[in-house]
Amino acid sequence: MTSILPVVLAGGSGTRLWPLSRELHPKQFLALMGGRSMMQETLARVASLEAVLDPCIVCNEEHRFLAAEQCREIGQPWSAILIECAPRNTAPATALAACHVLAQGDDPALLVVPSDGYVEDAGRFRDAVAAGLGPMEAGHLVTFGVRPSSPETGYGYIRAGEPLDGRARRVAEFVEKPPREDAERYVESGGFLWNSGMFLFKASAYVAALSRHAPAVLECCRNAVETGSTDMGFFRPGPDLARSPNVSIDFGVMEKTGAAAVVPLETGWSDVGSWPALHAVSVVDGDDNALSGDVVAVDTTRSLVHAEGRLVTTVGVDRLVVVETGDAVLVASWDGAPRMKGVVEGLKARSRPEHHAHRRVHRPWGWFETVEKAEGYQVKKLAVRPGAQLSLQTHRHRSEHWVVVRGTARVTRGESTLTLSENQSACIPRGCRHRLGNPGKTLLEVIEVQLGDYLGEDDIVRHDDDFGRGAGGG
């Protein structure tokens, strides 16, 4: 049986689910519908397939440690984590994975899946993948289409053509996101499927299709693999990747090849690309409300209300989205919620930090959260994983004071090393080399008070780092 290599595409920014989703922590890494993140749910789903290999994950530079940590949390090994130096869309990301595995002398089936999609029934997902293996072995490039349950205008559509083996059909046409009247006609006809953005093909078959239909993508990705290198367990492609055309698999290959086939995916599915879409796949109460966190909803119907740190109440509203985080509150009508991209672009134009990161910022050693900030001082809470440590660093503009509130800290300060327990503290003068580590077996939690004339994250000079990072960022 042909081995299946899942290629998990985890490079998205998830702007449509702001303020939960941020550039440094986008929706694929969020637990939107339970205890596991969307990427972890995807990894578990593909791991249940027969003859499956450890997945290949494609993500960007800023998310590489987060992707690795989420794999470790669920005990999922990976075959490779490939770092995109710049987002170039799905065709180059998949080409990178194909060239990487072919360079190792293997030619598995690539099952390309977004990291942030929702699939209701994992068993039916496995059935669809199994149904795609026959057409794939016959040389087809297989995609998976979902039976539409409504005339959605936010999805692309696939018109199914003549039957092939089993459940598969030839692809007669790909249709971009249609206007409402066309979407209604597609659903009524019964001959159209939603485009799920999932694919199945041999690595060599995809490379051959690229050579015919998108040769510039193939050239750039092949060169990037040949000149790439392994960096702390991650594969960093060469600079040619940044020159690749920015193109999707659909537009670059599937719409041009005569070998495209589609297998119906007979289960609930969503790309969870908006707040109404998240509501549609969430557990709701008797008034059709999706509520999470500390929420009191009175005379509230058909709404999504999410609270992270405070009590949120609603009274007498219908079809409303309310999302509260530590540094932002979103209130949107049902019709206005899909236009979140404009909000994020507005924040960027105003140089606001809220589009980029949460108050809690994840680092490979753990996380930090800004508690309070004013002129001349800043208070943070740091959490350091067992066995991890921050970089050995100095600051030009600030001093720091650390108070241990839970766990055991190992503090390097100049030439000395201190071990601190709960309710013990250390002062770090400006310009002093220092490092914070956790030698214990439980999470270390520290309150950090910074004092100085500049408190930005780029006021860091690293002298040594376990994670191979440059200046700035903790």
Image: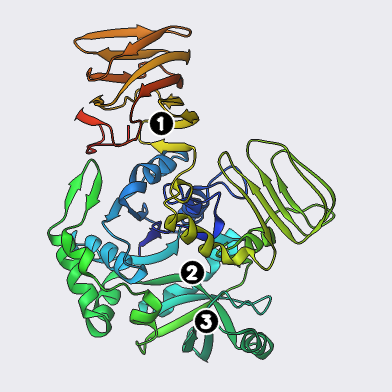
Q: Identify the secondary structure beneath mark 2.
A: helix
Lower sequence index among marks 1 and 2: 2
Amino acid identity at mark 3 = Gly
Q: How many marks?
A: 3
Residue 88, numbered circle: none
Amino acid identity at mark 2 = Ala
Amino acid identity at mark 1 = Gly
Residue drawn at x 44%, y 63% as measured from the top left: 113
> Between tags 1 and 2, which lies in front?
1
Q: Alpha carbon of mark 1 to alpha carbon of mark 2: how far?
A: 39 Å
- Specify whether residue 337 is in view: yes
Q: Identify the secondary structure beneath mark 3.
A: loop
- Specify whether residue 1 is in view: no
Seen in the picture, residue 160 relative to 359 is either above or below; the reply is below
Return the residue found at the far left.
227
Residue drawn at x 13%, y 61% as measured from the top left: 226
Q: Dot 1 corresponds to which residue? A: 366
Q: Where residue 121 sits: x, y (%)?
A: 62, 61
Lower sequence index among marks 3 and 2: 2
Q: Identify the secondary structure beneath mark 1.
A: strand
Q: Is residue 89 left or right of residue 155?
A: left
Return the residue found at the far right.
299
Q: Which quadrant would residue 367 be assigned to in this image?
A: top left
Residue 130, numbered circle: 2
Q: Is residue 241 left or right of residue 422?
A: left
Question: Within 10 Å of the Cα at label 3, are there few (<14), some (14-19), or many (20+) other Cα atoms?
Answer: few
Q: Which quadrant would residue 231 be assigned to in this image?
A: top left
Q: Dot 3 corresponds to which residue? A: 166
Q: Are marks 3 and 2 in contact (CB under 8 Å)?
A: no
Residue drawn at x 38%, y 36% as measured from the top left: 363
Along the viewing direction, whichever of 311 and 51 lies nearer the viewer: 311
